Amino acid sequence: MDKKVFCLFFICFIGLFVISSVNAVEDKITSDYQVTSDLSNEDIQKVFDSANDGDTIEFKSKEYKNISLVVDKKLNIISKVNSNIHVSFDIKNLRINKTFGFYFTPNSKGSLLSGITIVANSADYGIVLNSSDNTIIKNNIITGGANSILIRNSHNVGLTYNDISKAIKNGVQLQNVKNSLFYNNKISYNGRSGIETSNIDNNNISYNIIHHNRFNGISMYNESSSNSIKHNNVYENTNGIYIDSNSKYDIINANTFTSNRRDPNCELGGYESGNGLLFGADFKTAKEGSAARLQVKYNVLTHNEQYQAKNNPELPVFKLGDNWFDSTDDSNTFVCPMLLAGIMKLDTISVKNGIGLQMYDTNGNEVKEFATFDTKVNVDGKQYTAKFVNGRAIIDAKLDSNKEYDVEVEIGGKFVKYKYKATGEKDNNNANNKKPDTTNSGSFNTNRSSKQGNGDSNSPNNHISNSNSSSKKYGSNSSDIYSNDYSDNGQNTISNGDSNANGDESKEGKAYEVVPESKISKSLTETSGIVVLIMVFLMILFIFGYRRGQ
């Protein structure tokens, strides 16, 4: 083949490819829709039904009433004015005997719901995700409902930056959920648990604030495997976390479980309330030494009214990892005698012109992934608040590096004294670190006190005691009454059946506004024809020039 003819053929091919690419981009243009409060729920549902995958539906008004919507395709549902959507308590879709604000079907995979306040006071659910993979629920406020959010049979879900409160039962229900992220949510004032799980696998539950729920902050039932529960702040619930599942490869690390309160009307029984961590009768895990065994370490368990951590009396003794119990005395950790617990220690580190505090494990090693908590520090007539982040607290106290100070750190309700000199490096990472003295007492809880557990109880030994001893002692358990646990797990859940149904369609005319294409899409539409014409013109010029050259 003539070389020039080949070049001509190649250039024509490239030109046709560019033209086809432009047309392909045009085909992927999405539309934006706006809905306002003068539309009925039926009208808004028609907008959802007529939209295409990838379209955006924006709620423009401040308040909508009697809303119950089915999302049956991939949609971006947003509000830029924090629209208040009041869920209908009598509209039921999909032939399901439940009411809800938004129901995401299996066809809605990849959808987004953001910037909306959902008020579900008299409904069954605020939001339901049923087999809706890759869906993101973020920056919303959800209040009320029998359960505020139900996520079931779904993978790769993101539930982030939401405020979830005042459900009659659970704030968030997770059923058969895998590979999902539950991050930085506030979950509070719900009638039962903040988060209730059943059959969850490989999920990340982290940096959530879970408080003032009438039952447990987190409840785990049935199967749980390879889940990471880290850096959550769980306080003022009946129990911090309740584990009643068959747990494999789960990690409960660097959480704060504090100030959880006793409730004589707790469904587990009054003596099974007020614990930072509580194991249920159905808790199971692999044998000690197995990689699949549940790990509970580097958590803060303090100021809980009953026990900092409590086992079920029907279960064998379980060994926790190293945790902080706000105690310098191993006999006053208020961990029940059916648990072995490594007692983390606190000591000073010298930092230039400031005060440094560091957490250590039972082997005297620095702990760098640790829960967040505050304690008071007195020095030179002034009181400071030391905030522990990743196992270390630094106070910029502007101390004289040539002077020795008496530093008092509050531990277990009393102030522990240290002789301290601020001669270390200013950089936290280069502080003049030291391992604590490991010669004094045992590193496991002994709990010889017969008092009922209280994280604020004071130790008779007014010093920091760090030990590498392997002695294992047990203490008394004042809670000798056990009540069988009960869960409503599985109740009020929505059936999978008919989840793809579209509901009844209205015969009324068009009752919504279709927003013009976005500036980017419009620009592409207006210029794509020009691009095609230019490419054709250049090709004609090239062919004409080539023939003249011949």
Image: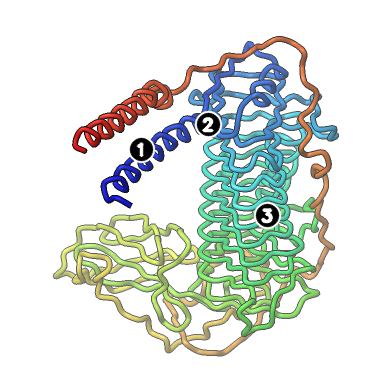
Front residue of 5/497: it is 5
In the displayed structure, does residue 550 sit left or right of residue 249?
left
Q: Is residue 170 above or below residue 371?
A: above
**In which quadrant of the rendered view does residue 218 lie?**
bottom right
Q: Residue furthest front?
A: 550
Residue located 57% across and 47% down the image: 158
Q: How many marks?
A: 3
Left-right relation of 223 to 472: right
Under circle 1, the secondary element is helix
- Residue, x 73% and y 35% (percent of image)? 145
N-terminal of the pair, mark 2 or mark 1, is 1
Which residue is the site of mark 1?
A: 15
Q: Position of residue 252 (x, y in %)?
A: 58, 66
Number of other residues with Cα within 10 Å of mark 2, as a class: few under 14, some 14 to 19, many 20 or more? many
Cβ atoms under marks 2 and 3 closer than 8 Å: no
Circle 3 sits on which residue?
Answer: 177
The residue singled out by tag 2 in the image is 115
Q: Nearer the viewer, residue 258 or 247?
A: 247
In this view, the mark in front (1 or 3): 1
Q: Amino acid at mark 3?
A: Val
Q: Which mark is residue 231?
A: none
Please identify the quarter of the rendering in which residue 359 is found: bottom left
Q: Position of residue 56 (x, y in %)?
A: 54, 28
Please tell me which of labels 2 and 3 falls first in the chain: 2
Of the residues under marks 1 and 3, which one precedes in the sequence? 1
Of the two numbered discs 2 and 1 in the rendering, the one whose residue sits closer to the viewer: 1
As helix, strand or loop, the secondary structure at mark 3 comes to strand
